[in-house]
Amino acid sequence: MKRVLIALVGLFTALSFSSCGYNTMVSKDENVKAKWAQVENTYQRRADLIPNLVATVKGAAEHEQGTLTAVVEARAKATSVTVDPSNLSEEAIAEYQKTQDALSQSIGRLLVSVEAYPDLKANTNFQELQAQLEGTENRITVERRAYNEAVQDYNTTVRSFPNNIMASIFGFKAKGTFQAQEGADKAPTVSF
């Protein structure tokens, strides 16, 4: 009888410790999902600004149709790729980032082509849109950093002992982070 009582007390103690770990993992998982939603929200803000930027540039630079088309196509592709918050794997995030990087490159080419149009550069609407895009790019960086920090905290929790035992039982898996794009360690060449 004593052995059964000791076993029950031991089991109860183990379950109470593990439930705390479970609740912590759930909380951190939800935090990661919220941070991911903010990343998507910021990318969406950029995608929403692009039609206004394209329309403003289009009015002044009709013959730059190829650049404008590339921006519109990259935006469409970037907004069509989504990542399920319950599957934030390295591969899913890399694919998402690949389409966002293509959009960033298209916007960069558009902004470089604008240098040839002094009237457009002086246009107040264009300057405001350009400032909005710069601000959005900064917001993207901030949100990606916050997401990576939340993922690091979550991954540390689910991989640490004894939480790793409960994590494997309840299906908590490590999440993927944003990585620098290939070639980011080299300064870009700007030429006109």
Image (spheres, rainbow, N blue to C red):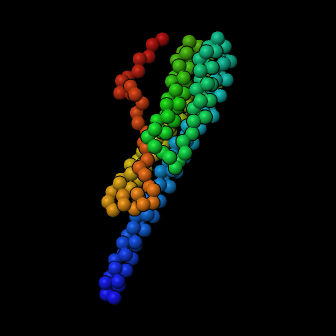
Residue 61 position (above or below residue 156): above
| Percent of width and height locating residue 96 | 51, 36
Q: Which of 135 and 2 is in front in this view?
A: 2
Residue placed most toward the observer, 68 or 59: 68
Q: Nearer the viewer, residue 183 or 91?
A: 91
Horizontal arrangement in the rendering, residue 157 relative to residue 88 (left or right): left
- Who's the residue at 47% across and 51% down the image? 32
**Quadrant, the N terminus:** bottom left
Residue at 62%, 29% (x, y): give it: 76
Total marks shown come to 0
The reply to whether residue 118 is visible in this rendering is no
Left or right: where 5 falls relative to 56: left
* Residue at the image point whose x is 36% and y is 24% from the top: 186
Q: Position of residue 174 (x, y in %)?
A: 41, 49
Res. 168 visible in picture: yes
Instruction: Name the side, left or right, on which 104 lies relative to 18.
Output: right
Could you tell me which residue is drawn at 38 percent across and 49 percent down?
A: 152
Q: Is residue 31 left or right of residue 124?
A: left
Which of the 4 image quarters holds residue 160?
A: bottom left
The picture places residue 22, in percent across and down from the top left corner, at 43, 63
Residue 136 at x, y = what percent? Answer: 53, 35
In the displayed structure, would residue 2 be above or below residue 156?
below
| Of 95 and 3, the residue lying toward us | 3
Looking at this view, name the residue that lies furthest to the bottom.
1
